[in-house]
Image (tube, grey):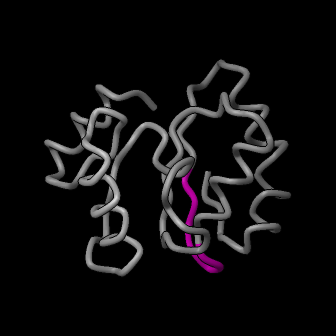
Amino acid sequence: PDRASAYELSARLLVPAITAEIPADERRATLRAFAAGELHTLVGPRLLDVGVPEHCAEVAILCGGGFGNAQRAARLRRVRPGGRVYELTSLGTMEVGRVHRQRHGDAVRSGAVHDG
């Protein structure tokens, strides 16, 4: 969920990264291309917080469950109904319990199929 990881994934997978360091015009153009279906994959530390329209993504992979309920619900709204949400959490942390408690309600509200 950090900028360095986003750039590493971007380089390994050859997909665009969206971070605050990317020039604003380039970010907007990349997000427009994603929303139009011209790009199928993006990576970023806060990507689902900024710019991705609701019900636009087919798959979301959330790393870390440390965000609050409102932020989490906003991220899930970016996934279209019938889409998939994957959450990666670290065993032995408080994230695991939080994700289990929130998963069902969030998936039902978003219409997404939620894989943990």
Residue 59 is situated, as x and y percent measured from the top left of the image, at 48, 65
Residue with the most extreme front position: 25
On screen, residue 43 versus residue 23, left or right, reads right
Q: Main secondary structure of the magenta part?
A: strand
- Name the residue nearer the viewer: 47 or 115: 47
Residue, x 46% and y 32% (percent of image)? 1
Q: Which residue corresponds to the image point at 75% horizontal and 63% vertical from the top-left?
A: 107
Instruction: Give the magenta part as a residue range.
Output: 80-86
Across the whole image, how many numbered discs are drawn on residues?
Answer: 0
State the image coordinates of residue 51 (x, y, percent, origin top left): 49, 57
Q: Is residue 111 left or right of residue 14?
A: right
* Residue 79: x %, y % from top left: 58, 68
- Residue 7: which quarter of the image? top left
Q: Nearer the viewer, residue 84 or 71?
A: 71
Q: Is residue 42 above or below residue 40?
A: above
**In the image, is residue 83 above or below residue 72?**
below
**Is 60 colored magenta in this rendering?**
no
The residue that appears at 69% across and 54% down in the rendered structure is 74
At horizontal 70% and vertical 43% (from top left) the residue drawn is 71
Compared to residue 2, the image places residue 28 above or below, namely: below
Q: Which one is in front, 46 or 94?
A: 46
